Amino acid sequence: MFVKSNQLKDLLPYYISKLKDVYPQKEIENIFYLICDYKHQLNKIEVKISNSKLSESQLLMHRQIIKRLLNNEPIQYIIGEVEFYGLTYKVNTNVLIPRPETEELVDWILNVLPNKKFLTVLDIGTGSGSISISLKKNTNNTSVVAIDISKEALDVAKYNASINNVEVNFVLADILNNNLENLGQFDVIVSNPPYVLESDKNQMSQNVLQYEPQIALFVKDAHPLLFYRRIVELSKQSLKPKGKLFFEIHENFGKQIKKLLEDNGFKKVEVKKDLQGKDRMIKGELLP
């Protein structure tokens, strides 16, 4: 036995001893209690006061989790779930792990949308479905369509819609090569497209590079606004008069994307900073 007492609370020093060269101790503690919550349904206080002993299979599970952590696998993929805007989402290596700045984007959209009017929303590059499902869950009179190039990602998104009891129309589509006329007209189009430059890879952590889907992350340095240009082009055809376009953006490209929207007839263009003070989202309105 690697924990003599076989008690859950006594596993924490083992986690620290194994992971101390990879993670700060505070992060190890957070990871440990997150695992306890998901795998044993016990919160931090309950773990500390519990005297329950672990079975051999449970101890083996923790050993396997530590091995995966040592291989840089994100904890979100290990537990298979993440919380986003108050909802639970399944995640795996077919979808990006939803980030806090995307929650801020969702919150901004919800604060801008009128409450009583029936709205149609299109989410381009939905991934896990975090944006589309959160918007549907938090509005009363909204029809939501979400598209992605990856069938595997859409399978995850469909599952997430089902566990969160919302209806979203998921469509397999490649926006670089497909038009969207058959999907109808929308009051809101939102996208968190690939925007990380390939040259940024050497600054990124291994858990992102090794496990998260690169097709959803990276663009070539020579074409940093590739997806923004295409989505703006499609939005001019698919947005209703006074329709709104929202993007999550690379912090270094706020001015360029603002100009892109303005050059294509969008008005009331606004770049918004995230809680870290970085330009991370933008909206524009297509006025008649």
Image (cartoon, grey):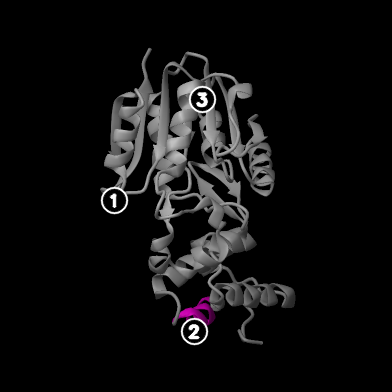
Horizontal and vertical percent position of residue 73: 56, 68
Q: Does dot 1 land on a helix, a strand or a loop? A: loop
Of badges 2 and 3, the one in the foreground is 3
Question: Quick check: can you spot residue 78?
Answer: yes
Q: Determine which residue is flagged by label 1.
A: 276
Horizontal and vertical percent position of residue 92: 62, 56
Residues drawn in magenta: 12-20
Horizontal and vertical percent position of residue 229: 43, 37
As drawn, the label of residue 139 is 3
* Real-space CA distance between mark 1 and mark 2, rounded to the nearest whole angstrom: 32 Å
Query: Who's the residue at 38% across and 33% down the image?
Result: 108
Q: Which image quarter: residue 271?
A: top left
13 magenta-colored: yes
**Which one is earlier in the sequence, the residue at label 1 or at label 3?**
3
Horizontal and vertical percent position of residue 78: 61, 64
The amino acid type, in three-letter code, at marker 3 is Thr
Label 2: few (<14), some (14–19) or many (≥20) C-alpha neighbours in 10 Å: few
Q: Which image quarter: residue 180?
A: top right
Q: Does dot 2 land on a helix, a strand or a loop? A: helix
* Real-space CA distance between mark 1 and mark 3, rounded to the nearest whole angstrom: 27 Å
Task: Tell which residue pokes out farthest to the front in this image.
Answer: 222
Label 3: few (<14), some (14–19) or many (≥20) C-alpha neighbours in 10 Å: some
